[in-house]
Every structure is written in C-alpha cells, then in structure tokens.
Amino acid sequence: MKLLFYLSLRKIKKSLGRFISIILIVALGVGFFAGLRESSPDILTTLDNYYDKTNLMDYKITSTKGLTDEDVSSLKKLEHVSKVIPSYSVDALVSGEAIRVHAYLKDLNQVTLVKGRLIKNNYECLADATYFKLGDKIHLSKLSIDGILEIVDYDVVGLVNSSSYLSKEKGIATIGNGKLQSFIYIPYDNFKSDIITEVYLISKNTQEENSYERSYQESLEALEKEILKLKPIQETKRYEEILETAMKEIQKIEEEFQVEKDKASKDLNQAYLTLKKARQELDSGWQDYNASKKLLLENEESGKKKLEESKIKLEQGKLAYQNTLLEYKLQEENLENLLKETKNNINTLEEKLNNMDTTDPNYSIYQENLLSLKKLETLYSTLIQTKKSLEISEKTITQEENNYYLQITNGKKELEKAKIKLDNSEKSYQIGLSEYNQGVKTLEEKTLEAEEKIQDAKDSLKEIEKPEWYLLDRTSNNGYTSIYEDAMKVDSIAKVFPVFFILVVALMCFNTLTRMVEEERGEIGTLVSLGYSRSLIMGGYIFYVFFAAIIGITSGLLAGYTIIPNVVYQVYHSNYILPQLEVSIKIIPFLILVFSFLTMMFLITILSCQKELRNNPANIIRPKLPRKGKKVLLEKVSFFWKRLSFTSKVTVRNMFRYKKRIIMTVLGIAGSTALLLTGFGLKDSINKLIKLQYEEIIHYDALFVMQNNYQELSKELKEKLNSSGVINYLPIYQESFTFDAKDISHDVYLMVFENETKHNQYVTLNSKVNKKFIFPKDGVVITEKMAKLLNAKIGDLIKIRNNQNELYLVKVSEIVENYTLHYMYMTKESYENMMEKNISYNMIIANLKDDVNEENLATNWISDNKVSAINFTSDNLKTFTIMVDSLNKIVYLIIFASCLLAFIVLYNLTTINITERVREISTLKVLGFYDKEVSNYVYRETFMLTIFGIAFGLLLGVFLHSYVMNVAETDNILFFHFINWYSYILTCLTIIGFSVIVQVFTHFKLKKIDFIEALKSVE
Amino acid sequence: MSYIEFKKVKKVYKMGEIEIQACHDVSFQIEKGELVVILGPSGAGKTTVLNLLGGMDTITGGNILVDNEDITKYQRKDLISYRRNSIGFVFQFYNLVGNLTALENVELAVQICKNPFDPKTILEKVGLKDRLNNFPAELSGGEQQRVAIARAIAKNPKILLCDEPTGALDSKTGVKILELLQKTARDMGMTTIIITHNALISEIADKVIKIKNGTINEVITQNNPKRVEELDW
C-alpha cells in the first residue's frame, strides 16, 4: 500500500509535465464551466445587495397633476407599505444638456458617495460621478417647472453613483433635446412647491427577496393591489380639488374683470360728458362767428351802398359843377373879359352911378349891367365855392372809402382768426370724439374678449383631464431590466458552452490517462504478477488522478468563480454604472461540483485502466506486441496512391494506424473549431439581427410621440413637419397590448397606419408564410416570434389584452418577419371595428433628410410642446448596438476560451503523439533526418488531422451555433441564424494558427529527444 | 593516415552533479574496408565509442578523424549530414518503422541520401526478395535485422556501425546475420564496425579492439580472420 502510494508520488515527479497538463486541462474546463455558470447569479446577487443597501424604492408614483400631502398620508395608511416618501424632481438644462434634479433623500434611493462629501448647505449638490467633477459649478436654466426652485446655482461637493441610474443611458427628458444626460441631488428643502412630483414606496414584504426572482414580484402584489385600489379614489379627489381651484380662479377673474369694466365705463362716461360740453361751446363759438360774419357782410354791403350813394351824389355834384363849369366856361372868356370889364365897369359904373343920377337913362342900364355883373361875380364865386366844396366832399368820400375798406379788411381778418381758432377747437374736439369712440369700441372688444376668455376657461374646465397616477416599479429605472437581460444572455450561453468544455476536457483526460496506462504496462504487469489486486493497482491511478483533479478542480473553481464573473461584469461596466462585484462561493454547490467532477475523473480513470487490467497477467507482463502495420484502403486506389510522394504515403498510413488517436484528434479539434465558429457565429447573428431589424425592417428615421391625439393633422403641424427636414411622414396609432404564452405575459405593440398602403416607406413587412405580403383587410398581422410563442397560424384566433386588461379576440391574418420585440399591424377599419371607436393618431413616423440634425430637431419640437418625445431609429440602433456589444464581449471571452482549449488539445495530442512514437522518431534521427524533416514527418499527420478536424468542426459548429441560438433566444428576440463567410475563414485560420504555434513547440520538443536512450530500450 | 582515427577520446556524462566517465584516453585507428569488432563487457563504453563515431553524441575531449575530417568539430547540423551520408546503423532491436513495409523501411532511409543503392536490389541481396511488402510485425527477428542491415547498407555509407546486431537473436539466426555483415563488408569494401560482448564473434574481424572500463585494453590485428561458418558456436 505504502509502496503503491510512493510509486504514484514518484510517477508525478517523473512525469511532472503530464501531471501538470492534467491539472491545467481540468482547471480550465472546470473553471470555465463554473465561472460562466456562476456569472449571472453573482451579478444578480450583487445588484440585489446594491438595491437593498441603497434602499431602492419598490414603487414610484407620479401623477399627471402632481401629488398632494393628502395623497401621501393616504398612501401611508396602506397595510403593506413600510416607507412612503414624498419627493421632488425637475428637469433642467445645464449648459444646454438636460439633467434631472432630485431632492436628496436620506433613507431611500440612497446614493453611494464616490468622492467628496455630502451636502451641508442649500447651495451644494451631489452629482453624477460619471458626468461631473468635484468643484463644478452648476447653473440650472430652463427648469421644466417654473417656481419650483429658487436657488439655481450649486457647487458640486460630492460625486455619487445611484442605484436609480444603472445604465449610462439615463433615459428621456422633458426638455432640451429629450435626452437625459445626467442627474444631481440637491437639498430637499430647496423645492418650493405645494405639489409633490413623486412619491416613493417601499413594501414591507420585499426586503428579503431577490429583486430578480419571481418571488420579488409576487411579494409586491399585495401592495400593488392596495395602491391600485387607492388610485382611482385619490385621482377623483385630486380631480375635484383641481376643478374647484379652477372654478374659484375663474370666479376671481370674472370679478376682477367686472371691476375693471365698471371703472372703464365710468371713465368713458366722464369723457363723454366733457366732450358734450366741448361740443356746446364749440357750437356757440360757431354761432358767434357766423353772426359776426353776417354782420360784417351786412356792414360791407351797407357801407358799400352809402359809399355808392355818396359817390352818386358826388357824381351828381360833379355833374352840376361840370355843367356850371361848362356854362361858366362858355361865358368864361367873355366873362373874364367881361369880368375885367365888369370890374372896370363896375368901378366905372359905380363911379358913374355915383355921379349919375338915378334918372339918367343910362343909369338904369348901368344899373342893370351892374346887377348882372354882380350876379356874375356871385356866380363865379359860387362856382369857386362849389368847386371847393366838391373837392372837399370828394376828399371826404375818398376818406370814407378808405375807412370803409380798412374796416372791412380788419373785420375779415378778425373773422379769419376766429375761424382758425374755431377750426382748431373743432379738430381737437373731433380727436376727443374719435378717442371716445375708440374707447367705447375697446371697451366693447375687451368685454367681449374677457367674456370669451371666461367662457373658454369655463369650457376648459370641462376639458380638465382627470389626473392619472402612474405606478412605476423598479423596471422604470433605466438599466434595471436590461442588465438582467444581459445577465440572462450570459446564462443562456453558459448553459451550452461549458458543457462542451467539460466534454473536451473529459476526452483529453481520457486520452492522456490511456496513454499513461499503456506506457506503464510493464509496471502494471509486474505488480499483477507480484499478486497486487487490480483494484489496488487501479487505486494507485485513481490516487494519481485525484491528486491532479483535486488541485485542478479546486484551483479551476476558485479561479473560475473569481475571474470569469468579474470579466463578464467588467464587460458590463461599459454600459452600466455598477457597484463592486460580490463574488460568492457557496459551499454546497461548490462541493457538489467538486464531487461530480471527481466522479467524472474517477470514471475516466477506470475506463482508461480497464483495458490493460482486463488482460491476464502473463499478457500484461509481456511487452505489448508492436501494432501491426497495415495497408490502408486508399492504397487500393493505385492511380492515386502512386501519385503520392513517399512521405505522403507514410503520413496517410500512419494516420490510419492509430484509429483512436485519429478520432481523439479530430474530435478535439472539431470541438474547438465548433466552439470557435459558434462564438464568431453568435457575433455575426447578433450583428445581422440589428442590421435587419433597424435598417431593413424598421427604416423610418424618427417616431414623434405626440402630446395630443389627432383625427387629422393640423395645417400648422404639417407645415412644421415640412419645415423640419422631414421627407415624408405618416400618422400612426400605437398602443401597447399584452398576450399570454405559457403563463408568461408578453408586451406587444399594435401599430395602425393612417394609410396602410404607404407602410413600405417606413416599415417593411415581409410575410413568413406567403410569397408576397399583402396588407390584409381584416384581422391582425403579427410578428414571427409572437406567432412562435403563441404557436399561432394564419386564421387562428388569439387573445390580447389592453392596458385596462380588457380582452380582445383577434384573428391572425398574416405573419411577418421581425427580430426584436413584438408588433401587431392592423388596418384603420379593423381597429375601429375591434375597439368600436374612431381612431385618433398618437404618433407620427417620418423619414428625415440626410442633413437633419436630430438633436436640434428634438430640441425644437420638445420646446414647442408638440411632442412628448422623439424616438430616433438611429438611437435605437445605437442603444441596441451597445447592448449587443456587451454580448459580443462575452462572445470574445468564449472565443478566447475556445482558442485556449484548441491550443491545449493540439498541444496535448501532439505531445502524446511524440511520446508514443519516440522510437520511430529516434530512428529517423539516426538515419540522418534533419530536425525540420523530423518535425515535418511528425507534424504532417497532425496537420492533416487538424484539417479533418476543422472540416468536421465547421459542420458541427453550424449545428452547435443553431442550438446555442435557440437556447440563448429570449422571449422578445428572434435570432437570425447567420454565420458570415469570413467567420468560417477566421475560425479555420485561428485553429491553423494554433496548429502552427503548437508545431513550433513540437519542433523544439522533437529536437530535444534523446534518441540514443530511446533506441536502447525494448519498446 | 588511417581512415578512422580516435585520438585520446574522452566522454563524460553529467547526471546532475555526478560525472560519469564513459570513456577516456581512447585512441585507435581503423583502415578503410576493415571489419572491426569492438569487444568488451557490458558497461565498458563500447556503445559510447560507437555513438561518438556515428555522430550521435558529442565528445568531451580528444579528436575523431573520419576520412581526414575531424567530426568532433562538427555542428549539430553537420553531424546530421554526416549521419545521413556517411554512416549506416544496425541496432540490437532493429528499430524498424512498424508502419512501413520492408521495402518502405529501406526507402525511408534511401530517399534522403546522395548515392543510395536501389532498395529492392539490396533487399534481394540480404535474401528478402519475397518479403518486400511485408510489415515488420510479419517478419521474424532475423528477417527484421536483415531489413535493418539492408536499410543501413542501401544508404551506401562510408562506415557501417552495428551495435550488438545479434544480441536479440538466437545463435543460428545470429550466424546468418554475421555472415551477411561479413559478406557485405568484403564484397562492397565497406568499413564495418561491430560491437559485441561475445568474444567468439571477434574472430571474424580484421581488427579487434578490446575495451574495458572505458579505455582501450588491447588492439589486435588479425591477418587471417575466420569466416563466420568456421566459428565454433
């Protein structure tokens, strides 16, 4: 016994290489097996602990109209609730990017401080560690709710991670370009709002549950029921409250308006009176003016008449004077002479008369003469007199005329002045009047307007929607679900790959041990002949194998448990912000694994020893007969055989000599090749899937989620669409339904196109049943995976439920190609028939011009409050690509492991090949084969087998790939089974590459063979 | 100048810290075409001498001249070429490649040589005309050794080295093999060196080199060597 034990120990020492290679193979296989299997449980446990530690909410309630203290207190009264915490959040812009500002809570949704410290005053905040730096100054602008925050400038004093934000994609914002970039936490008291934006709840029952297990959902149900019961009550209460407030508001407006109206009327009245007075004054002014004007005219007339009369009189005087003058003039000459004479005569006459007696005859004549003379003289003087008076009267008249004209002109001037004055007054009066009229009109308009407004307000009162509560669970956290799905993907891969690893490992161990037993045949024979029992001898081997296996299994398990989950987790770090991974090694599963692997190794050992030990001792002790050389079947095809070179012939014959080795080698290489091809193929299929789904099936560029529903798009909206760089667009109606398949509820989106004949410009529907897709007039078009889940065929009736849990029975009329999520398509008419209501569209799908900047477009539309979000297909593509990227990295891990396996397989097989044939190789050396020739001689065979293995492996890989795809498929993804041609080439090249590397190793190994020693001994 | 000359050849094996002197101060000459027997008990260093001469091992001290070439100065590759073109080996355990027929085993050696003989002719010469296409497992020990000899001769080597060629054979077969070796050495004028611990065999040699404890004990030149059939078994 003791000796056998020592013998085994010595064997280990002697063939340390083999011992180590067993350890390595076992460790590698077991490590990968256990590591991959443990990855997703570890990750999910870590996350669950993270949620527990940070007290992540179970539910979050938001409402379309906000929540009140009353809501909170009624929630607190629920039986199954352990914590109800009202809180606030608001979206704001920080240098143009949308971030969410949360109230910092101490005992729920706690954050993990990465750097810095907690907040101490109202001007400090904690910020997203991935986005901000310590000491950053944050200025919040364009808060989505005005007046909610007074302080808008904050210093970043602490950087945090939050379990509410697992994904690096933070989700949707209500402002900016609609993409939430980051988040900060500010002091709770900074929120100055009566309306609570959200209430967080923690259930009494979920603390002990693992978040990602069914039991978690189940233990939440009690609380969910309670909340759903409370929901309508609180909604109605809130609705009434809002209604009341609104009515009060309207009343207040009405009253205010009345007061304003009264005041305005009063003012107008005053103005009216003033105007009236002004009119009166103006009118009397006009009267005076007209009277004056009339008087002036009369004066002018009478003056003129007088003047005329005077002139006539003067004229008459003048005429008389003229006549007199004429008469005078007629006599003048005589007169003058007469006068002279007269004068002389007078004098003379007087003298004479004086001297003459009166009786003198002459006297009387003289007397008479004197008289006429005197008369003449009088006449003359009268004439002169008249002339003089005439001249005076003419002068007077002229004077009078001048006076008259002056008077008239002055009068007119005054009159003119008066008129101007009056005109001005009239003008200002008119202005006053029109102002007044305007005032009246304005008042009327304003009244009308106000009345309309009040009416509108009253009308809108009717339109006030009933507030709706939204009950959001943890899945509303961005990343909460997707990381679970990612982990599950690893899990589904872990279901298949590691098994293959174990198979290959078992094969290799079997190979190695068989060789070892064969080598030690002589020793076994000796022991048997000495009388050791077979089981005792086998015990020695089992001890040897267990020694190696325990080291291999333990180190493999430990390394696998610690390294692989970490590697997988590390991969997720590119998409998520995660806590440190908690690697847990659970003792019982660990021991079970150790035990099962040991059992496997035990069986392998027995299987390997069996053949030799079954022989009778005499046979065992004799050297094994050299294996007979044999002609291969190929040699019968002489025309082919003849063409082969000597070395090729040797190769062919050697290859067929050791059939077991052929099988082992081919299987080993085929296994590695298949694994590799599957790895590459997974990558291809996933990439192909994205391409098909987001480039070939869904090829609209943007999905506008509208704020309102439309029967028909308004002109304004159409114009806005056209001016936003939209090439074409189509209103659609989308509603989410659920369907049950095998007790699991799945979401499905119903899409109804405004015009289903145009769907091809946005979504390509390829029938999976018929050659050509024709949009069916009735029934519903469902997608492939949904049909698969429901096991539905065309013509079947399927059950779907809407949000209100109302059941509908619809007929499947067509099944179309689709790879991610589930969709249903219907015509307008069949939708209206099914729902018994008119359709109104809630979304628009559109194709954009190439130069459209999507961010700007989104910013523009969101700021207009026209849409609540714009979903860009390019973003979906990006998100999906990122998600798939992480899966790709897992695939790389598998590829890497497969490569390692391929290498070990090749190395091990070649090594066995060499040890088995060391004598033959030595002979070649003695014969003078150069090192290279020896390597070629040996390696040609392995290489040929590698080629066979690759060919077989590629075939196997196609099936394995298909199988893995089926296993890895989740419920809302349909994998497209596809392997790119270059993946085949890459797989071949990788294996051949390893083959070459192994060849190099082998070459040096061959070089070192001590051929003298090898040739000395009997085989 | 002799065809083969050993000058104070020394070989030390290092086994860990222990040095084992396999041979020392070995000097002798062999002429071209001579049939030489190296005689000595087990562990005397005969095989070491043969291996050194066959270019299978490197020397620790001294010189070995073969056809005026100092093979102790050869690099690894030169040694392989030397083995390839100048040396034919026959071992105690034949060392045939089991997966090749008799003819193919000869061909295996021939295909890499410069001036080989035709494998078939040689096999006929060694008396295996009817066994050309048999695999080693189908041949008797003597037949196998004949194939081995044919394989060594077919290379047309300068020197034929035989390490206990009859060691694994019964005496009757052994005689036949010795006859074959003596005949080829005479007919083809091939310098042949046979290692044996059997003193009887030494009688057929032109020269007998006796080795004891790693050094030359005695070199006897026999002017009239016996023919094999004259040996008294």
Image (cartoon, helix red, strand yellow):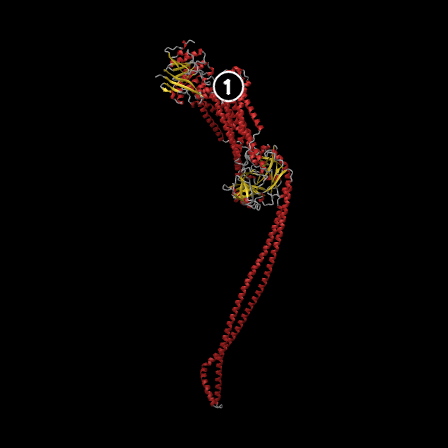
Closest to the observer, B79 or A842: B79
Indicate whether A123 appears above or below A318. above
Total labels: the figure holds 1
Chain of the residue under the numbered disc 1 shown in the image: A
Left or right of residue A846: residue B183: left
- The secondary element bearing badge 1 is classed as loop
Q: Residue furthest left?
A: B1
Classify residue A235 by image quadrant. Answer: top right
User: Which amino acid, by three-letter code, is at mark 1?
Assistant: Glu
Q: Find residue A190 and report its horizontal and vertical position in percent.
A: 57, 44
In the picture shown, does residue A737 fall above or below A897?
Answer: below
Compare residues A550 and A266 and report the one nearer the observer: A550
Q: Is residue A434 visible?
A: yes
Q: Is residue A543 left or right of residue B187?
A: right
- Residue A295, given in percent of the width and then of the height, sits at 56, 69
Going 59% across and 53% down the picture, which residue do you hit?
A: A446
Give the percent coordinates (x, y) of residue A959: 53, 28
The residue where tag 1 is placed is: A520
Asked whether A485 or B39 is in front, the reply is B39
